[in-house]
Each structure stands twice: as structure tokens, then as C-alpha cells.
Image (cartoon, rainbow, N blue to C red):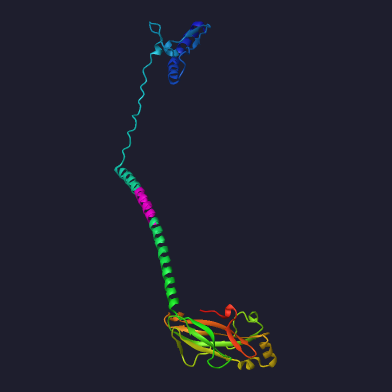
Amino acid sequence: MSPKALAIFAVVTATAWAPVTAFAQATSTPSTNQKAPALSTASGSTAALPPEASGQSPKSDTGVDAGEFRAPRITVANPPPAPAQWPLHERIAWAANIVLAIVGYVGVMMARSLLKKIDRQTVYAEAAAEAAASTAHAALLHAQAIVQAERPWILITAEPAGNIENSFVVMATNRGRTPARIVATVDELRIAIDEAHLPLTPEYKNERPSTPLVPIILLPGESAAIKPFCRADLKEVCETEERIRRVENWEEKVFLFGKVIYRDLIAPPEKQTHETNWCCWYIHGRQKSGLVIAGPPEYNLHT
């Protein structure tokens, strides 16, 4: 094939591939400074493609590249979203919450003030109750003092028995201000070296007090005999001459003790009964005798 034919074949081939190259350049993003490829000819020379085929912009008469004047790109921005409207029910709920908070605060403050007032009233009430209790206690003590002052008091004395020599009587006398009724008596006799050798508390062979056959009511200042004792009774108590001699020499002593149970006629039923314990020492001499109040405090109690 001659060189001329080869040149014609190259031109025809380039003309046929020009649209394909233009489409490829249009779909791709080549650099603006990329130069058009050159076609080699059969003779070894290169032929440049037209500017439109090579992707280069033609220059204008002023020398400025026509590719620099591209069409402006318009960007459409979405408008800012409109602020959401505050629904009516949410406004009402918000206002209701504010009102409830204010009402709750006011209620708490009122409750606090009320609690302080209640606390002060409680303190005043406690003070008044204590004062009332003190007054009531004082009134009770006063009433008890009046009752004690007005109640009967049975006291015991030892007195000689009339015209009988060396004979004595234990007398119960009402020293109170109201009448007393003697309901029972009990007595015992014991021989001991001295008071220290007596039992700590009175002991009776017959624990059950004896009731008088005739009721004894003592008015204020009146007396009644509850236990007689004379010199002749010593023989029955001692039983032996040796013991009588020991009593005469005061080596042993004869003690008479007992109690009187009487009733207060003005006190309440549950507090009507009182007791008076007594103890006497019989002094036996060779010719004369005596009877005096003696004994430990436990033997001379009053209720």
C-alpha cells in the first residue's frame, strides 16, 4: 500500500472515531489543562485534533480561554422550616402546672405555719396539763390531809386497873376527831432476855384476830380495855419457880404485844380499816410491879 493510501486511511479512521471520542470526553471529567492526543501518521508525523475534539476550549480574540466563561450554576436552597405552633392544650397544661406549683408552695407555707401554731399550742397545753396535774395533786394531798386529820386514831396506853394492886390494863383510846369501831383484836405474850431477842416482826400463835362479842365504838376521847394483866398471871406464864426468879432478877423480861383493828366510819369502804400495833414490858418486882410501853418500832406501828 502506498503512503498516500495510508494517509487517506488514517484521515478516514480519525473522522470515524471523532464522535466517539467527543462522547467519552463529555461523560468524563478530564482536566482543563489536558492536551488533545496526537494521531500518528504513516510518515511518522503527528496531527493535532481540533480543539472541540480534544476537549480544549478555543481562545477568543482577546486571548482568554473560552472555557473560563462557564454557565453559572444555580443552587436552590430549601427555605428554613417554619417554627412549630404551641398547641392550645399544651399552653393550658403549662399554665395549670404553674398554678399548681404556686398553690402547692402556698399550701406548704400555710401547713408549716399551722404546724408551728400547733406546736406552740401543744407546749401551752402541756404546761397547762402539768399545772392542772400539780393542782390536782396538791388538792388530793390537801384532801388526804383533811381526811387524816379528821379520821380516828387509836392509841394504846398501859394503866393501873382500879383498886386492884399490881394489876394493869392495856387501854385503847380514840385520839382522833371522828368515831372509830373496833372490829378485832389480837395479843401475845413472850419471855425474852431483852427487846433485841424478840422476833423482827410480831408473831402470833393465833393469826386470826378475835372479834369482840359486843361492838366497841369509841367516840373521840373515849377509851376501852383490850388486855388485862396482873401479878398473879406471872405464874401461869413462867410455869417454873426458876423462871419466875429470873424474871424477878431481870435476867429475862415479859413482853405483851398485840394489835387493834378498827374501822373509820367516814372514809371510803376500801380504806375504812386501820391497825394499831402495841407492845408493853411487864416489870416484876419483889413487892411492886409495873407495865410500860416498850418494844422495837415494828411492834408499835400505826396505819
Residue 99: give x, y in percent of width and height. 32, 46
85 displayed left or right of 178: left
Work out whether residue 221 or residue 189 is closer to the camera in this orientation and state it: 221
Point 34% across, 46% down: residue: 102
Residue 297: give x, y in percent of width and height. 58, 78
Queried whether the magenta region covers residue 114, the answer comes back as: yes
* Up/down of 250 relative to 20, above or below: below
* Up/down of 111 relative to 78, above or below: below
Point 41% across, 60% down: residue: 127
How many numbered discs, if any? 0
| Start-end of magenta stretch | 104-118
Residue 181: give x, y in percent of width and height. 46, 86
Residue 138 visible at all: yes
Work out whether residue 70 or residue 80 is closer to the camera in this orientation and state it: 80
237 displayed left or right of 16: right
Work out whether residue 34 or residue 52 is closer to the camera in this orientation and state it: 34
Point 44% across, 18% down: residue: 25
Work out whether residue 44 or residue 238 is closer to the camera in this orientation and state it: 238
Queried whether the magenta region covers residue 209, the answer comes back as: no
Q: Residue furthest right?
A: 242
182 displayed left or right of 296: left
* Up/down of 240 relative to 138, above or below: below
Residue 204 visible at all: no
Where residue 197 sits, quadrant-wise, is bottom right
Residue 165: give x, y in percent of width and height. 57, 92
Where residue 248 sits, quadrant-wise, is bottom right
18 displayed left or right of 245: left
